[in-house]
Amino acid sequence: MNIQHKWNFSIGMMLCFLLFIGACKKDKVAVPVVPFKIDSYYPNSGNAGTLVSIVGEGFGTDLSLYSATISGKAAEVISATESNIVVRMPEGGATGALALKYDSRDFNLGQYIYQALSVQNVFPANGPAGSQIRITGAGFSSTTGPATVFINGKPALVVSVSDEIIVAEVPLDAGFGPIVVKVDGKEAKGQNFTYQAISSIKPLSGGKNTKVTINGVGFEELAEGNQIDFNGTTATVLEATKEKLVVLAPDGVKTGPLSVNINGQKTAGPVFTVVASPSIQIVTPLSGPKGAEMTISGALFSTVLDENKVFINGIEIPVQSATENQIKLLVPGGTGTGLVKVVVNDQATNGPQFKDQTLGILSVSPDNGLAGTTVTIKGSGFSSSAVNNKVYFNGLLATVKTATENTLVLDAPAGLSTGDLKVVVDGEEALAPQDFRRAGMLTLAGGPNSDTFGGFMAGIAVDNSGNIYVADRLNHLVKKITPAGVVSVLQINGADVVFDTPYGVVIDKQDNIYVSDIGRNHIRKITPSGQNTVYVSGFSPGLMTFDNAGNLYVNVVAAYAGMNKVNTAGGYSKISGPSWPMAKAVVDANGNLYYVDSGSSSNNAVSRIAAGAGNEGYFIGSSDPGYQDGAGLSVRFNSIGGGLAIYGPGKLIAGDRYNYALREIDVNSRKVSTLVKLNPGFADGAFSQAKIGSMDDMAVDKDGNIYILDAQNKAIRKVFLK
C-alpha cells in the first residue's frame, strides 16, 4: 500500500511540474525587436574629429552594443538616444563607406568624405519661402568662386558667407530634403530641411468654434508641435498630419491672417474673416410631403455649398443650392415634426418648426393687404372642395372662393389684423411661411372726384391724437382730418382761420400748430387754447420741421434762398449749406439735420449737416435720377418730393416721388431699401394694387402709420406698414 501511494504521489508531482513548465511557456512574452529605422545622417564630410549625427527612430540607447567604422577604420560612438546617434570621425581615416553596427545588426549609411568642407548644423531646419537659415560648418570661404547652397536640390539665395557660417534664403516650394553646400567643386551635405507652406484654409470665414482645415506642407505630425494663430489669438489643434491641420477657431477670434508656427518659424496664411451666425428669416413651406422643395431665406449663408448644413428635426438634409441669402433643398420625408436648423461653418441657428405631412403652404400672394384683398394660396394637400378648406387670418375665418389640390383663392376677411395665416384640411394644419400683414393704402379723405380739398395742397402734419392737418392753398385754409376721416376747417372760437397762401404745417409737442403763409411772409402759431399770433416774419416761409429743442427749420420759398433756423424766441438766421430746399427736412434725436436740395442735387440726394459739424452735400444718393437700393452714393432716387420723416430710431423714410416709392434709410450704415413700391394712378388696397398720383409731403404718427399728401388726386392717403 505504501509503495503504491508513493508511486501515485511521484506521478502527481511530475504532472504538476510538466503543467508548470507548459504554463511558463505560454506566459513567456517575446522581447520586441527594436525598429531601428535610419532616416538620414549628416554631415557627410569633414576632417578628423567631425561629429556625424544619425537621425531616425527606435534606436537602442546602450552604447556597449554599438560600433562604427569609416573605410574599415573604427569610429567612436559617443552618444545614443531613441532618435539620434552621434559618431566621431577618427584620426587617420580615409574617405569611404560609413557603417554602423548595433548588436548583431549592420547598417551601411553611405559615403563620408574627409575634406575641409563640412556642413555641421542648420538653424532653423524648417521654415517658409523667404525665411533665412543659418548654416554652420567649415571650409565655406573661397577665392575662386562663391559658395552655393541647395535645399532639396533647389538653389537658395546666399545672403552672406564666412568660412564657418552661411546665411541663405529658403526658395519657393523647397520641399523636404538635405541642405547641400558646394565650394570650389567640392560638395557637403547637411541635415534635412522641412519646407513649410499654407496652400489654403477652409472655410475662410466663421466664428468661435468653427473647425478650420489648413492644407499645406511641412506641418508637425504631433498636434502640440503646431502653434496656430488667428490674428493674434491662439487656437486649439484637433488633428495633425504633415499636409493637413484641423483647428478650432478660438474664443475672441478677430478678422485677420491665420498663421502656423513650428519650432519658432511662422508661416502666414490667408485672412480668416469673422462673421456672425447665420439668421433665418423665412422657411417655406413649413409643412409638406416628401419631394417638396424647401427654401430657407435669411442672411450670412455660405456661397460654398458644403459649408452649409441643414437639419430638420435633427436629421441632416442635403443642400441643393446656396447663396448668401437663400438655401434650397428637397424635403426627404420621414423627418417627423421638428425645428429647422441651419449650420454654417459650425455656427448654428434655429428656425421655425417643420411638419412632415401632406398639407403645406408654399406661397401667399399678396402676403399683405386690407380687408377684401384677393389672396391666392399655393401649396399641397388642399381639398378640391372649397368648403373643406378652412383658412384663418390671425384667427379670423375667411371664405374660400375656389379651390384645387394646390391652389386656394379667397378674400381677406373684415376685421383683418396682422398675424399668422393658417389652412386646416381634414385635421391637418399648415402655417404660411410668414405672417399676413394688414398693410396697404387707403384714402383717408378727398379724392380726384371730390371737392373736399382744392388743388395744389402743400404741407401736412399729425398731432398727438392722430388728427391730420393739411394746407389747402387754393381755399386759403388749413383742413383737419380726424383718424376716422372726418374733415373740418381749422377754427378758433367757431370761426375759420383764414390765410393768404398757407404752405407748410408743423405741430410741436404741445399740439401748437404752426402754419407758414407765403402770401404774407410770416409763420402763424395757433395754440390749443385759441391764440393766433405771428410767430416770425420777414421771409417767404415754405415747408418746416422741428428739432427736439423746439427750433424751427424753414425752407425759404425763392430760388437759391436756402433755409432759415427760427429759435424759440422767434429770431431767425440763415443755415450754411442748403441751397434751394423744397421738400420737408427732418432733424433726428441727435440734432443731425437731413434735407433735400433741388439747387445742388436736383432733389435726388439726401444731404446732412451733422450736429456740430459741416455740411455733407451728398450723404446718400446722387444728383443723377434713377431707382437703386444700396448704400451711400450708389443709391438712386427720382425726386424726393415727398420729403423726409423720422421712422424709428436711426431710421428715416423718404418719399420718392417719381418712383412712387417709400424708401427707408438707415442713417448709420447709409443703406437704403424700398418699403413700398406703388403704381401711378388712384386706387386703394394692397400694395400690389394701390396707386398714387403724387407725393408732395408726408407725416408719420406715433403708431408708425404714414400719411401722404397726394395733391394730384386732391387726397390724403394713409399707408399701413405695421
Image (cartoon, rainbow, N blue to C red):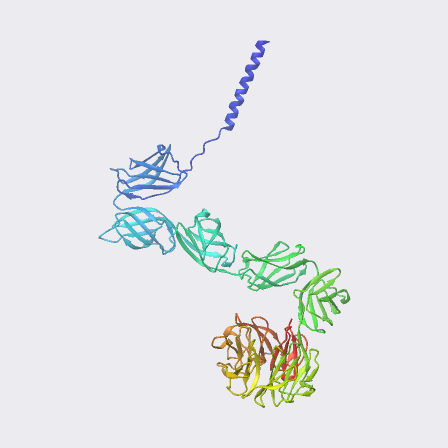
Q: Is residue 570 above or below residue 118?
A: below
Where does the N terminus fall, quadrant-wise?
top right
Q: Residue at x 45, y 32 (%)?
A: 31
Q: Quadrant of residue 171?
A: bottom left
Tell me where residue 582 appears, x and y as whole percent.
Answer: 55, 83
Q: Is residue 491 above or below residue 112?
A: below
Q: Count how many numbered circles sit on residues in the image.
A: 0
Tell me where residue 444 appears, x and y as whole percent.
Answer: 68, 79
Q: Residue furthest right?
A: 387
**Residue 476: in sight, yes or no?**
yes
Tell me where residue 490 appears, x and y as whole percent.
Answer: 66, 85
Tell me where residue 10 appears, x and y as whole percent.
Answer: 54, 15
Q: Quadrant of residue 401?
A: bottom right
Where does the C terminus fall, quadrant-wise?
bottom right
Query: In front: 716, or 172?
Result: 716
Residue 268 relative to residue 147: left or right:
right
Q: Is residue 598 above or below residue 429?
A: below
Q: Quadrant of residue 198?
A: bottom left
**Residue 38: in sight, yes or no?**
no
